[in-house]
Amino acid sequence: MNSMLVQTARFGSIEIESDKIIYFKEGLPGFESLTKFVLLSPPELSPFHILQSIEDGDIALIVTDPFIFKDDYAPYISKSIFKELEIEDDSQAVLFTIIVIPNDYKKMTANLMAPIIINSEKRLGKQIILDKGDYPIRYPIFQNLDGKVG
């Protein structure tokens, strides 16, 4: 199995197995030139994960499963997105939302308007901007985590 060493601002030098790389063909909004990421899941950050750029060690986004804090979240994702990411079965699709954690962590928010969808088998990802549904860009989540942090 091939692996590579990636320098990151947050975790120092980490070894990444090449089959763990997630490809974002169009990058992420604001980071269009970055197409290769890896999902890091340090146990101490549970239920959060780090979507770490392999091409720029300074770029790391905190993500989580939106259903942990909003169980009625039901974003409409078009069939064309599933086709683009080669998702043939719902079980292949993993949904994340980007989290912003300010100095006062109790004011953390989730971007429910622009979820990230990943084909967990083929390692293809895309951040989509929802055009249906009234989801906020800054949804306060701390009070909805109910002891699920840590």
Image: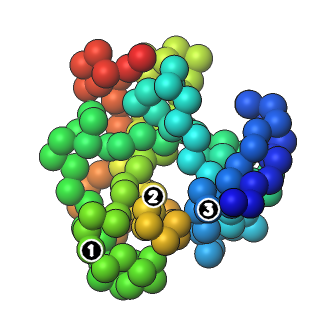
**Amino acid residing under circle 3:** Asp
Which residue is under mark 3? Answer: 19
Which residue is under mark 1? Answer: 89
Which of pointers 3 and 2 lies earlier in the amino acid sequence?
A: 3
Residue at the outermost front position: 1
| Above or below, 147 relative to 89 | above
Q: CA distance from mark 3 to mark 2?
A: 19 Å
Which of pointers 3 and 1 lies earlier in the amino acid sequence?
A: 3
**Amino acid residing under circle 1:** Asp
Instruction: Tell me whether the residue at label 3 lies in contact with that at label 1, contact meaning CB atoms closer than 8 angstroms.
Output: no
**Residue 74: percent from left, percent from top:** 20, 56
Who is closer to the viewer here, 91 or 97? 91
| Above or below, 25 relative to 52 | below
Question: Can residue 143 be seen?
Answer: no
User: How would you rate the neighbour count of disc 3 (Cα within 10 Å): few for under 14, some for 14-19, many for 20 or more?
Assistant: few
Which residue is under mark 2? Answer: 116
Secondary structure of the residue carrying tag 3 is helix
**Residue 80: percent from left, percent from top:** 36, 85
| Above or below, 108 relative to 62 | above
| Above or below, 99 relative to 87 | above
Q: Is residue 114 left or right of residue 11?
A: left
Residue at the outermost left position: 72
User: How would you rate the neighbour count of disc 1 (Cα within 10 Å): few for under 14, some for 14-19, many for 20 or more?
Assistant: few
Secondary structure of the residue carrying tag 1 is loop
**Residue 8: percent from left, percent from top:** 79, 39
